[in-house]
Amino acid sequence: MQPKRASAKWIIGLFVGLTVVLIQGVRLLSTDTLESPTHSAEISVLLQEQQSLAVIDSERRATLNKIIGIISRYNRNMSDESKRAIANEIYLMSRKYSNLDVDFICATITHESAQSWEPNVVSKAGALGLMQIMPTTGAYLAVQEGIEWTSHEQVLNDPILNIRLGCRYLSDLVSLYNHDGGLAAYNGGPKRAEIWIASNRDRSTLVSETRNYVPAILKLYDQFRTEGVM
């Protein structure tokens, strides 16, 4: 699977949609059809569709600008091209997974990358990339996503693939344990998260890293949500 294929398809689809609506609108606006009540209704529908597509594109652009702003805040050395590609992938993942919005994804990446947004970051435990994925977990997720597992460095250091794999895993965990439990599972493992939830979220059941991890990301999440779009 090519990293940019999904984003290219989305953009092409939006462009084609706008073009089709425009062509149909021009056809219906011909003098032969303006006086027909049926065609007047069709014109109204097409105008509404065109407005809806324009709103979607406007919202997408605003969201991408917000993500790029967050990336720039933590990584000023990243190229504009890389920022745009990463922002677009985050946006696509938020559309793919209804339980992950861009602010939650950005908060997770910000904390996981130690506020560096550096695609090649490696933890002491051996987790790689923006969403700090362990090689064994990454290999499993790659099979689910249909991504060729050439090597853990090549796949997990690719920010687009890393985000794609990380969001799939995070979405699965959030579906099982909600946002806070999903974060606990992402950091400390599902079994530990289940114990925590069963104990009515008793902090003492979590390891110290996870006890700090969950509230830290939720704090960033609230911060990014409060900032709104740019």
Image (cartoon, grey):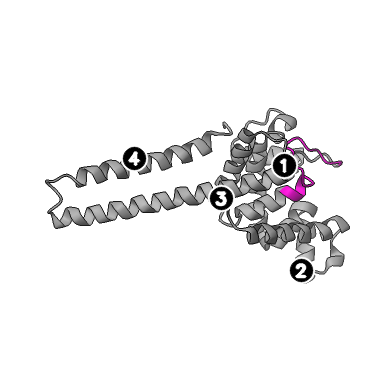
The answer to if 123 sits in the magenta stretch is yes
- The magenta segment is 110-124
Q: Are marks 2 and 3 in contact (CB under 8 Å)?
A: no
Give the mark nearest the N terminus, 4 or 1. Answer: 4
- Callout in the foreground (2, 3): 3
Q: Are marks 4 and 1 in contact (CB under 8 Å)?
A: no
Q: Earlier in the sequence, mark 1 or mark 2?
A: 1
Q: Position of residue 76 (x, y in %)?
A: 72, 39
SS category of the residue bearing label 2 = helix
Q: Which residue is mark 2?
A: 198
**Residue 35 visible in the snapshot:** yes
At label 3, counting other C-alpha atoms closer than 10 Å, the crowd grade (few under 14, some 14-19, many 20 or more) is many
Figure quadrant of the N terminus: top right
The reply to whether dot 4 and dot 3 touch (C-beta < 8 Å) is no
Residue 53 disc label: none
Residue 208 or 120: which is nearer the viewer? 120
Judging by the rendered image, the residue that carries numbered circle 1 is 130
The residue shown at (63%, 35%) is: 80
Circle 1: residue type: Leu
Q: Answer with left or right where residue 46 lies relative to residue 172.
A: left
